[in-house]
Amino acid sequence: MDAAHRSGCPINLTLEMLGDRWSLIVIRDVMFGNRRHFRELLNNSEESIASNILADRLKRLVANGLLWKRDDPSHSQKAIYSLAEPAIQLVPLLAAMGAWGRRHTPVSRELSVRAELLENGGPQMWDAFMAELRHLHLDAPAPARSVFAELQAAYLEAVQSGIE
């Protein structure tokens, strides 16, 4: 057992890596919102993350191998954040969390519609979404199906119907 960790339990180790209040929110925003720059993550956060917290979480997520960072060729002072393979493999976990949250918490329609689609789509949809995320973040070949577009369309439709 490594002295840096409380135990060798896989649930404990996962929580040590992801269990703070903001890490999964940052991953969610990169994954489902395709927010790739610091300012996009900061300014479009539904939960209003503070800039110092966001900077810390991005640094931790990169250090833990969940995100990777590269310079933005369009701007010398900007970086682009991408999901690493371990973060992409969180899709089933996030789908399960979203399904649980829909059943046991007071969710909003527009912010829960993607969770509903992922729950109903099951492992086949999760696999297709992970393939697409590998294309968007790891330069893998483009899949035939765009789950990202399906999720975004459902979200926009829910937002629009909430306004009317």
Image (cartoon, rainbow, N blue to C red):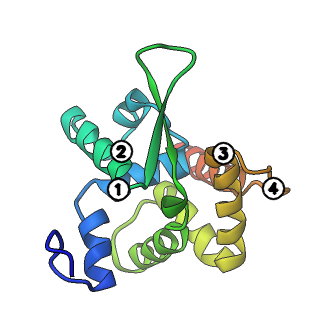
- Label 2: how many residues lie within 10 Å, few (<14), some (14-19) or many (20+)? few
Q: Position of residue 14 (x, y in %)?
A: 32, 73
Closer mark to the observer between disc 2 and disc 4? 4
Q: Nearer the viewer, mark 3 or mark 2?
A: 3
> Which amino acid does the dot numbered 1 rest on?
Asn
For this view, does 140 lie left or right of residue 102?
right
Q: Are marks 1 and 2 in contact (CB under 8 Å)?
A: no
Residue indicated by mark 3:
136
* Label 4: which secondary element: loop
Q: Nearer the viewer, residue 1 or 164?
A: 1
Residue position for label 2:
46
- Cα gap from disc 3 to disc 2, whole angstroms: 23 Å
Secondary structure at badge 2 equals loop
Is disc 1 placed on a helix, strand or loop?
loop
Q: Which residue in the protein does label 1 denote?
A: 64
Which of marks 2 and 1 precedes in the sequence?
2
Q: Residues within 10 Å of mark 4 (few under 14, many from 20)?
A: some
Residue type at the position of mark 3: Leu
Query: Of callouts 3 and 2, which one flags the residue occurring earlier in the amino acid sequence?
Result: 2
